[in-house]
Image (cartoon, rainbow, N blue to C red):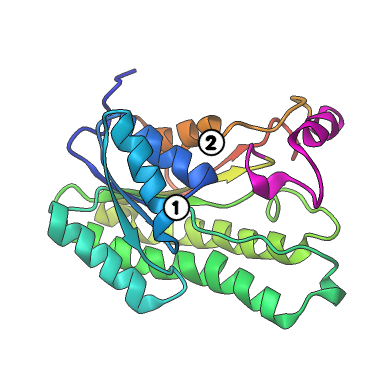
């Protein structure tokens, strides 16, 4: 496998200020990409950029709220104008809200869908429009979850519904735009080594003990494992992979 699959490619990663998004940004930069790290908090994004640069890569930070159409359109337009193209986009930005459905405030439900679903719709709309105009097209990877299409857990119904919508959006968009040279897929992580997978008051050691029983592989996935799946789907090696949903969860959804 080439260590520089993305040399001279421009890659946009939303939600790049921490966790899986940061790992994805670092992985692309390590393989030669120019990375645009986008998100809502400039301080976190600048930390990601610093880590990329420390490792010898190239990255810039751009502030954008994916739930706002104007932000997303300006972000994608700016990337194309500054770097000449948008070759890969990873729509990773998302939020988690849990609790029994009957106890969930409408504001929490709305935030889940504003960011997790509308954010992906707005990103796809802008990214596909740009990539269709490019001779080389482009690749898009949406980050969903093993919750939703693949499995359900009591108390996480609203979040699962938002992620099931992401999977459906991806499959439909993939079919619509592959003839235009835009290849779209999904990665669906399970519990990963991020703060999102910690229960309230739970330590990482507590989580490790819990996962020995809850996951067939006996642990959470690393963010690097999730990033590796994203890079594969975005690479030329996956040229005939269209509309797939690659689950990275240690077998939990089986």
- As for residue 105 lying within the magenta part, the answer is no
Residue at 29% over, 20% down? 2
> According to the image, label 1 marks what residue?
44
Residue at 21% over, 32% down? 7
Residue at 14% over, 61% down? 81
Residue at 31% over, 61% down? 127
- The front one of 168 and 153 is 153
Total numbered labels:
2
Residue lying furthest top: 1
How far apart are the alpha carbons under marks 2 and 1?
Answer: 20 Å
- Residue 154: x and y in percent read 86, 57
Q: Is residue 216 left or right of residue 242?
A: right
| Label 2 secondary element | helix
Q: Is residue 238 above or below residue 195?
A: above
| Dot placed on the residue nearer the N-terminal end, 2 or 1 | 1
> According to the image, label 2 marks what residue?
226
Quadrant including the N terminus: top left
| Label 1 secondary element | helix
Residue 100 visible in this rendered orientation of the protein: yes
- The front one of 200 and 160 is 200
The magenta stretch spans which residues? 192-215
Label ID, residue 229: none
- Residue 239: x and y in percent read 33, 37
């Amino acid at each position: 496998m080439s260590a520089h699959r993305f040399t001279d490619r421009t890659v946009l990663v939303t939600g790049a200020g921490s966790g899986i998004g940061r790992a994805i940004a670092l992985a692309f930069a390590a393989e030669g990409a120019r990375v645009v790290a986008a998100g809502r908090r400039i301080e976190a994004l600048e930390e990601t950029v610093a880590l990329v640069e420390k490792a010898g890569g190239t990255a810039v930070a751009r502030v954008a709220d994916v739930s706002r159409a104007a932000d997303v359109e300006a972000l994608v337009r700016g990337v194309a104008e500054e770097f000449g193209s948008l070759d890969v986009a990873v729509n990773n930005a998302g939020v988690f809200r849990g609790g029994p459905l009957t106890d969930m405030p409408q504001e929490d439900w709305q935030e889940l869908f504003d960011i997790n679903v509308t954010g992906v719709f707005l990103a796809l709309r802008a990214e596909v429009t740009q990539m269709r105009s490019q001779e080389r097209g482009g690749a898009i990877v949406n980050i969903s979850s093993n919750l939703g299409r693949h499995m359900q857990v009591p108390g996480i119904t609203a979040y699962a519904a938002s992620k099931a919508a992401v999977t459906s959006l991806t499959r439909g968009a993939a079919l619509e735009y592959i003839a235009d040279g835009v290849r779209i897929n999904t990665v669906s992580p399970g519990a990963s080594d991020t703060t999102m997978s910690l229960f309230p008051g739970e330590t990482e050691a507590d989580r490790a003990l819990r996962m020995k029983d809850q996951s067939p592989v006996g642990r959470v996935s690393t963010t690097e494992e999730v990033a590796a799946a994203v890079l594969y789907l975005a690479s030329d090696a996956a040229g005939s992979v269209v509309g797939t949903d690659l689950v990275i969860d240690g077998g939990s959804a089986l």
